[in-house]
Amino acid sequence: MFVAALAAALAVPAIESANTVGYNTGAVENYMFVGPSFTKIGGNTTFTYADIIVNCDETGEGDGSGWQPLGDSIVILNENGSFVRKIVYLPQFLADAFECQKGWYDNDAANEEDFSQCLNNETLEFGYAVQVSATAGAGATVQFAGEVKGTPTVIDVENFMGVANCAPKILSLADIVVNCDETGEGDGSGWQPLGDSIVLLNENGSFVRKLIYLPQFLADAFEVSKGWYDNDAANEEDFSTCWNTLLSWGVGEGFQVSATAGANATITIKSALAE
């Protein structure tokens, strides 16, 4: 579970300061998605892998807990949600041994002890998440630090990408705003009702279920609440269970989205500074 540490101002209902700073950090394991809940200081929204702080033993003199060097990894997926490659972390003591830069490397290259290409400068845009495969029980953590973004974040989504809870507060399904046509009179662009989905994975990174969005005009037709429903139930036109309040993500946690390519689908996450 990720937690956030903020300036005291964040504890009050309305935050006036636009430069409230803090960090989100938490234990990671299995195939969870994580991302920054804070922009970089100064408002820059482009992170690099070098900005991902893991609690890896940098000296080689620790007790073996924490992020496992060359073991725990960031997993890169393709447009179908399938595995592409793993990125592993090389701590300082191993970097010294191999006479290279500490940081992130391709797992296959690292297995061959080829550390010629450091991936520290690979970018991660604010609002997006990476998937982490961490050794169960190792006590691995990931941390992002920065300042609270003062405006909503609009995230372009397609295929099987990771989206981060980019506000330092608990995010429920009901808080996720998609650019879906609520009237049935639009041009068919944007988030596709009963098509685009949030994908839930299990601890092995395998598919569990999809959650789809029912806009207002369809909710009216089925005489139910607009919002999020299980895809299988929706296929049977069973809208008895609305998931709006049944699922949430902590600060810095993320989820996977499957969106129709070319649909111009977006997700909007409000700023924690908003009332």
Image (cartoon, helix red, strand yellow):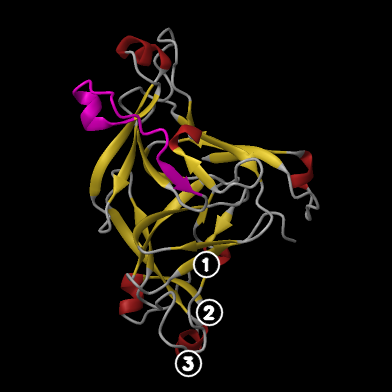
> Is residue 209 left or right of 54 when viewed as pictured?
left
Disc 3 from disc 1: Cα separation: 24 Å
Q: Label 3 belongs to which residue?
A: 185
Please, which residue is most extreme toward the front here? Answer: 116
**Which residue is at the front of the view, 140 or 20?**
20
What's the residue type where badge 1 is placed?
Answer: Asn
Residue 113 is inside the magenta segment: yes
Where residue 154 sits, quadrant-wise, is: bottom right
- Total number of numbered discs in the rendering: 3
Q: From the image, which quarter does the C terminus lie in?
A: bottom right
**Which residue is at the front of the view, 100 or 152?**
100
Helix, strand or loop for disc 3:
loop
Foreground label between 3 and 1 = 3
Residue 23 is inside the magenta segment: no
Disc 2 from disc 3: Cα separation: 19 Å
Q: Label 2 belongs to which residue?
A: 225
Helix, strand or loop for disc 1:
loop
What's the residue type where badge 3 is placed?
Answer: Glu
Q: Which residues are magenta?
A: 105-125
Please, which residue is most extreme toward the left here? Answer: 112
What's the residue type where badge 2 is placed?
Answer: Ser
